[in-house]
Image (cartoon, grey):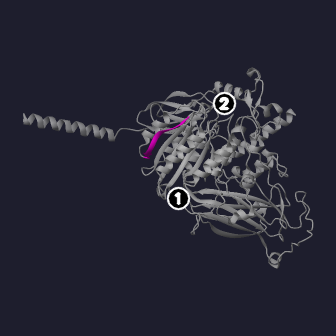
Amino acid sequence: MIKKNVILALAVAVLAAGLLTAQKTAPFYEIKGTVLDNSGNPLIGASIRLKNSALGAVADLDGSFMLTVQDSCVTLEVFYTGYLKKEEKACFGSLNAIVLEEDTRQLEEVIVMAYGVQTRRANTGAPRQRKARDSKKAPSYYKIGSDSPQAEAFQTEDYSRIQENRFHRATQEPQSTFSIDVDAASYTNMRRFINLGQFPPKDAVRIEEMINFFEYDYPEPTGKHPFSIIAEVSDCPWQPKHRLVHIGLQGRTIPQESLPPSNLVFLIDVSGSMNEPNKLPLVQASFRLLVEQLRPQDRVAIVVYASASGLVLGPTPGNEKQKILQAIDNLSAGGSTAGGQGIQLAYKTAREHFINEGNNRVILATDGDFNVGVSSDGQLVELIEKERKSGVFLTVLGYGMGNYQDSKMQQLADSGNGNHAYIDNLDEAQRVLVREFGGTLFTIAKDVKLQLEFNPAEVEGYRLIGYENRMLENEDFEDDQKDAGELGAGHTVTALYELIPAGVESPFLASGNDLKYQQRDLTPQAKRSNELLTVKFRYKAPDSDTSELLEEVVADKKVALDHSSDNFRWSAAVASFGMLLRHSEFKGNSTYETCKNLAQSAKGKDPDGYRAEMIRLINAATSLDKTESGGR
């Protein structure tokens, strides 16, 4: 009997060893393919997922993807905003071309939004009642960017009015002060409009956010300060007699494994307005990408809000990914929008599990359409300003179109020591939450302010390009109670000033009338110096209430435009594109053709293809401009 038991035990052991060996040596297969539209164009950022699995991939710039799986043939689920979801069998050894069909139902929804009953003006003003139109006569997209009364009447997206910065005479106003801005929401929102075949509303175009969408090749900081500073001066492409100053900041890059532990609260809008394919489903796909970046020392809680708010997942370690993903997948949309209540619960949850010397942050995903309880811009800003004192930072991710509340979300991010991104597809979610993980979620410097003093012996006048919503009073520079922008790990910040050299007459400058009671004589130092300007920087460490000061002197070395850096020319091309989209009075000699040529000369290294994409957008805007001109 004992002998039989021994033989049986040995047999079981051999069988188990065989199974273990088989498991270890089980083959893996690379399933490769492309995701295309009906015309054969790649659908960049399309989401590919193995059916009944969390395993997935995102289509790259060629629409290509690759999945490593255990079976030689699998069933894939493919999603892309504006297209019908598709299931398709894909096999190892062949290039699987997956073609998605446009979702005409979504197009009909867009038409309904364009010809809805209740609307409001693009900036301020009460809703107005309009008679609904026959959707059969409607165009396939709504021209939000059009100047026609019909387009204005059916505008339901909300943008703050931008009054472009003007030129100032250096003898009368020698200083210019502003807060940094690392947001890039305006660029992706602009891209969405042009991809829909229409120009964006001019107030949706914030030029500094377009410039700061792109990465620049700035040196890493080497000293005690968390960022490095560069300045470059050359010709202004759109005004040959003017000069352009390019100022760049590079935040210190921190390897992901060295980042402090995170206490994150996902605050997700699940109200009825989010029940559209490019809203809640895209939010869920975005957060799945973020969850994959989490480490065991990180933890996540999930708060949702609709008619009321609730905690659907308590703080959960980052290595319990399946539990977090399940909570995300179970979300569904419906009801009105009690955003203020959700914000309060999210901050309460973050405070209760606060990590000292860690990254404590609420990540809000919404279309911004708050309509229950605390909902006005003023009330929400006041609430966020109160909550930020706890040391919890805020990231705002905007989704959707038709009723997108850009103005509200920008204010919330600014008031909450945070940043604001607009997610128009899964590729953008990948950029913000994966490739720029540290910069989006980890603050290395807060309340960063810049103040430039111009030398009137060299500068007749100056204008800051963009940053209209970030301007500060000069006295705010030394006031540590004054809030300003935050800089994330690895982030870059770029600002451009257009200068009118001393002695150059310009219609943009008011007359420098002599004053009756004072004189403005230049100091001997200004007259004999070749200094163009002095840049001062103030910032605080994330856990400090006291600012530190840096200074940098900038001289004009008379570098010609074609000898300037790619950084300089690219930022100038983006600014030129923004001014053309805004129909700016300061665009000078800019045309879409000159803008494209300048961008092509500065494309440089473009590993992710974003610069090539902007050149494509310039081409598309050129075609739109010709179409609109021909229709007038």
Would residue 351 be found to the left or right of residue 408 on screen? Answer: left
Does the magenta run of residues contain 315?
yes
Q: Earlier in the sequence, mark 2 or mark 1?
A: 2
Residue appearing at x 61%, y 42% in the figure: 61
The residue under label 2 is: 39
What amino acid type should be assigned to the residue bearing mark 1? Answer: Ile
Does the magenta run of residues contain 157?
no
Q: Where is residue 154 in the image (x, y as percent from the top left)?
A: 76, 31
Query: How many marks overall?
Result: 2
Report helix, strand or loop for mark 2: loop
Type of secondary structure dominating the magenta stretch: strand
Q: Position of residue 319 (x, y in %)?
A: 42, 46
Residue appearing at x 48%, y 44% in the figure: 301
The residue under label 1 is: 254
**Relative to residue 470, is residue 14 depicted above or below?**
above
Q: Which residues make up the magenta segment? A: 308-318
Would residue 410 be found to the left or right of residue 333 on screen? Answer: right
- Corner quadrant of residue 277: top right
The answer to whether residue 523 is seen in the rendering is yes
What amino acid type should be assigned to the residue bearing mark 2? Answer: Ser
Report helix, strand or loop for mark 1: loop
Q: Which of 129 and 94 is in front in this view?
A: 129
